[in-house]
Image: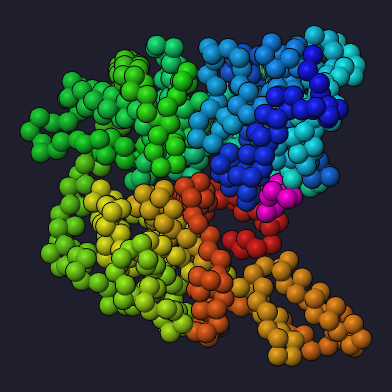
Amino acid sequence: MAKNVTNGDNYTARNINILKGLEAVRKRPAMYIGDVTSRGLHHLVNEVVDNSIDEALAGYNDKVIITLNKDGSVTVEDKGRGIPVDIHPVEKVSALEVVMTVLHAGGKFDKDSYKVSGGLHGVGVSVVNALSEWLKVEVYRDGRIYQQEYKKGIPQYKVKEVGKVKSKTGTKVTFKPDTEIFTTTKFKFETLAERMRELAYLNKTISIALKDEIEGEEEVYHYKGGLVEFVKYLDETRNSLHKPVFIEGEKENTPVEIAFEYSDAYSDNILSYVNNINTHEGGTHLSGFKTAFTRTLNNYAYKNKLIKENSKITLTGDDFREGLTAVISVKVMEPQFEGQTKTKLGNGEVKGVVETIVGEKLAEYLEEHPAVGRKIIDKCTRAAEARMAARKARELVRRKNALDTMHLPGKLADCSITDPEHCEIYIVEGDSAGGSAKQGRDRRFQAILPLRGKILNVEKAKINKILENNEIKSIVAALGSGIGSDFDAEKVRYGKIIIMTDADVDGSHIRTLLLTFFYRHMRDLVATGKVYIAQPPLYKVKKGKEEIYAYDDDERDKVIARFRGNGKSAELDENGLPKGVNISRYKGLGEMNPDQLWETTMNPETRTVLQVNLESAAAADKIFETLMGDSVEPRRAFIEKHAKYANLDV
Ligand code: 0RA
C-alpha cells in the first residue's frame, strides 16, 4: 500500500498530486466556490449537504442534520450509505481518503444517478476540505465507525476504525473554515435556512434539521406535500384563485415535477430547478413548460368556448402567465449548464420531455376540473384585455416623448462620458441628498437621479399604472433601456446603477421598492450584476481633529476602542470614553456635505458598494410581498419573527 502523506519522507506520485490539487484550490478558491465572502463560506455547507441529498436521490437517505457548533465549526450528518472505505483500486488508499482529498472524486463512482452538479455545485467535498483549517470525517458503514482528520486538506493519519455500531449507516463531516481564506467565517442561520427549506420543498422525502448551538435556535424542514407546499409558501401573501395543481411524469429517464397556481396578482413567479439547482436563467425545461402550457390552455379555452369566437381577444404566452406562480423541477442525468451564471439548462432533449408531460397531464387535469379551468381562462382573458389597454397607454406616453431616450428627465444630472462601461448612475432618495450628490460627484462619469418620495408599489399595480408613475418614468428614461417586454439590456446607458438611500425605515422601504422594480421589470440588469447598493456610513466618530467614519456598530466600537487606547492617561467621561470623543449618527444622506458624501460613499477608491444578485433581489421581492401584499397573517408573522433584529423597523 502507498505510504500515507503525513509519514512518507519520499513523496509518492499520489502525494504530489494531492498537494498540487490542494494548492490549486487554496490559491484560487473563487474558481471553485465563487468567492471568499460570506457567500462562498455558506457554499461550503451547501457542498457537503448536496452530497447527502445525492444519497437521498439515490434512495438511501432521508435525514440531514446540520449543526453550527460553538467553536465556529459546522457538522453535516446524514443517514446515507456512508462514504466507501475500501482500498481504492487506482490510488491504493481508502476510498474515503480519495473522496476527501482528490479534486472531483467526490461523486459516486456509478454514472446512473442524478447528481447535484452544476454551476458552482458539485465541486466535491475535497474542496471544502482544502479550504478548512481542520476537518474530521466519520463514516458509519458495515457495522463499524471509521474516521480520518485533516488540516488544510492534508490527512493527519490513515483512515482508522474507531468503534462499532448497530445497523447505523451514514456520514458525518465536521469542518472549520480557514480564516486565512475567507473574509468572514461566521455562518448565518437564515442564509443556510433558505437553502435547506428550498431543498426540503424540492425533495419531499427528506427531513433537514438545522441547529445553531451558539444562538440556541433549531428548525426542521420537512414538507410531505413537496412542490405543492412550495407553491403555497411562495404565494402565501397573495389571494390564490384555486388549489395548487400538481403534474408529474417521467420520460427518457428524466423525471419532471411541476406545481402551479394562479392568484389575482399581475406579475408571474416561475422558479425552475435542475437537480435541485435553481436555474435562474431558465433553459430548455422552462421553454418546454411555457410552450406546452400556453398551447394546452389555449386549446382548452377554444374547445370549451370559454373565449367567444367573435371577440377580438387573442391570448399570448404572457397573458397565460399573469398571476401564475409555478415551480418546475426536473432531474437530468448529465445536465449541461450554460449562460452568464451557468444557470441555464442546455440539454435540448429536455424541452420535448417537459412539453409532452405538461401537454398530456395538464389537458387531463383541466378535463377533470372544469371549475378551475374556467377560473384560469377568465383570469388570462382579463390579462389580455389589460395588456391591450396598456399598449394603448404606452403608445400615448410615447407620443408625449416621456419614455423617449432622446428626452432625458429634467432632474437627471448626467455625466459627460457616454461610454456605458465607464459610467454610473446614482439613484438618490430625496432632493436634498440629490443636491449633495450632484455637488460631490465626479461629473465626468457619475450621473445623479434624485427621486422624490416613494416610487409606486409595482407588485400591486398594472403595467399601465406603472408606466404612468413619474419616478418610474424618469428611471426608465434615464437608463434608456425600455421596460418589461420592451426592455433591452444592451441599451442601458450606465454600467453601474447604484441605489443610494438613507439608513432609516423610509430608506430601506425605497430600496426594497427599487429592487423589486428592477427584479420584476428589468431582471437582466440584476442578472448581469449591474445593480448596486451604496453603503453610506452610519456614524462619524470624532476626537480632536481626527474624524473617522464607521459603517456599522462593530466598526464604531472599534474606532472608539482605538481612541480609548490612544488616550490611556486621559480622563474618562461619564460614559467611560476618553474625554472629547464625539459620536454622531447619520440619519440621512442629507446630513452629509458634498465632500463627505464623496469621500465616504461615492469615491470609487474609498467607497464600498454591494452588488445585488438575483437571490438578494428575489429576497427583497419576497420581503416586499410579505409587507405589502394583501394578506395580513404572513405580514404579522414576518414582523414577529424579525422583531428581535433591532435594525429592522417595520
Ligand atoms: C462516494 C460513493 C458513494 C457515496 C458517497 C461517496 C457519499 C459521499 C458523501 C458525502 C456526504 N455524505 C455522503 N454520503 C455518501 C456510494 C456508496 C456506495 O456505493 O455504497
Q: State whether the magenta stretch is mostly helix, strand or loop.
A: loop
What residue sits 50% from the left and 35% below the top?
119
**In terms of depth relative to the viewer, which is nearer, 13 or 77?**
13
Q: Quadrant of the C terminus?
A: bottom right
- Residue 642 horizontal/vertical position (percent): 65, 53
What residue sits 51% from the left and 46% below the top?
615
- Residue 631 horizontal/vertical position (percent): 49, 47
Relative placement, left or right, of 424 versus 603 is left
Res. 449 visible in picture: yes
What residue sits 83% from the left and 29% below the top?
9
Q: How many marks?
A: 0
- Residue 70 horizontal/vertical position (percent): 83, 44
Vertical order, 395 against 31 (above or below):
below
Vertical order, 393 against 56 (above or below):
below
Vertical order, 28 against 126 (above or below):
below
Q: From which residue to which does the magenta span run?
A: 179-188
**In terms of depth relative to the viewer, which is nearer, 285 or 393?**
285
- Give the image quarter of residue 257: top left
Res. 506 visible in picture: no
Residue lying farthest front?
10
**In terms of depth relative to the viewer, which is nearer, 33 or 299?**
33
What residue sits 90% from the left and 16% below the top?
163
